[in-house]
Image (tube, rainbow, N blue to C red):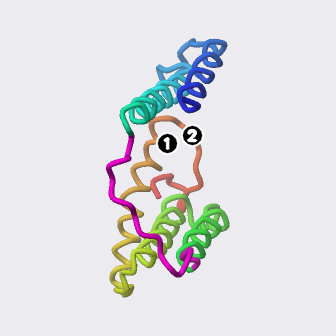
Amino acid sequence: MAVALIGLAIGWGALSISSEAGYAGVGPNFLPWVLALALLGCGIGLVRAAHSGGFADMEELSTPADGPYWRGFVWMSGGLLLNALLITHIGFILSCALCFACAARGLRGAEQQTSQTWMVTLRDAIGGIAISAPVFWLFTRFLAISLPALTTSGWL
């Protein structure tokens, strides 16, 4: 119920934002409305699940006897910190790819997948580039938002 109420509150706040479209064709109230509708939809889904019994019929998950997987937490936190530290030096795409590779390694370790070879890490980094490059180009070329680039051409 709280999620739906937060969605309604964001929608109410979006009413006070100007809807005048800018150079991109959407106004400044576009994203608040998207967020409000998404939260409202999730909130309604959660309320429906709660009233219909929710996840009561699911089998109970076993909790690991060892407690939290701190090594995975360190890998993921390190990836975020490296991203923040290196984004202005090596650019958005490479720093996000490094963050993705670190997060994938941490999550893979939490799943007790022990095949942490350099090929797997390289594949994760390539996957990070495949995700972050289109995001970079979308922001810089279509939305005209400046992100740190590796080259002065603005394509990397």
Could you tell me which secondary element the residue under label 2 belongs to?
loop
Q: Is residue 85 above or below residue 39?
A: below
Q: Is residue 103 magenta?
A: no
Magenta residues span: 54-70
- Say which amino acid is labelled 2: Ile
Sequence-earlier tag: 2 or 1: 1
Q: Residue at image x 39%, y 85%?
A: 116
Residue 79: quarter of image:
bottom right
Main secondary structure type of the part rendered in magenta: loop
The residue closer to the viewer here, 90 or 16, is 16
Q: Residues within 10 Å of mark 1 (few under 14, many from 20)?
A: some
Q: Position of residue 154 (x, y in %)?
A: 50, 52
The tag on residue 75 is none
The residues tagged by marks 2 and 1 sit, at their Cα atoms, a distance apart of 5 Å
Say left or right for 24 vs 56. right
- Say which amino acid is labelled 1: Phe
Say left or right for 154 vs 12. left
Could you tell me which secondary element the residue under label 1 belongs to?
helix
Instruction: Quickly name the residue at label 1.
Output: 139
Instruction: Quickly name the residue at label 2.
Output: 145
Q: Is residue 109 above or below residue 100?
A: below
Q: Is the residue under label 1 in contact with that under label 2 (CB below 8 Å)?
A: yes
Say left or right for 53 vs 2. left
The residue closer to the viewer here, 41 or 66, is 66
